[in-house]
Image (spheres, helix red, strand yellow):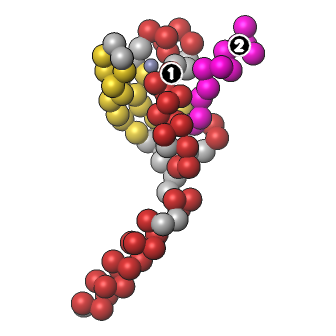
Amino acid sequence: MQSTIVTKAEKARRYAQEPDRLRITVIEATFEAGGGSHVLCLGADGWACDCEFFVANDVCPHAEAASRMLDAHLVEAAKPRVVDLLAAS
Ligand SMILES: [Zn+2]
């Protein structure tokens, strides 16, 4: 049993050095912004934020910043960019 625990612990440390193994698909988090905190969620439909800018534009600095923080662990569809609003306008 002890050798199994040691093997599993070694595997955990090795996996931790390989960030591509982890894909985040669901998140609920609080984002601390300059004017207060916002609730951020990531799910099957992408990001959602409770800020006014997100409600109006389906993207906001909080969702973009969170996706940048987690970049290595997200699929491309879960990486919103505020600057893309310029192309849509
Ligand atoms: Zn927001």
Which amino acid lies under the numbered mark 1 shown in the image of this protein?
A: Pro
Of the four image quadrants, the one with ligand 1 is top left
Residue 1 visible within the image:
yes
Task: Return the residue at label 1.
Answer: 61
Q: Is residue 4 magenta?
A: no
Q: Residue at coordinates 53% horizontally, 37% vertically from top-left?
A: 68
Q: Residue at coordinates 24% horizontally, 90% vertically from top-left?
A: 2
Which amino acid lies under the numbered mark 2 shown in the image of this protein?
A: Leu
Residue 79 location, quadrant: top right
Location of the C terminus (image quadrant):
top right
Q: On the picture, is 82 further left or further right than 35?
A: right
Residue 22 image position (x, y, % from top left): 50, 57
Q: In the rendered view, would you say 22 is above or below 8?
A: above
Within 8 Å: ligand 1 and the Cβ of disc 2? no
Q: On the picture, is 19 further left or further right than 81?
A: left
Q: How crowded is mark 2: few (under 14 residues within 10 Å), some or many (20 or more)?
A: few
Residue at the right extreme?
A: 87
Q: On the picture, is 7 further left or further right than 59?
A: left
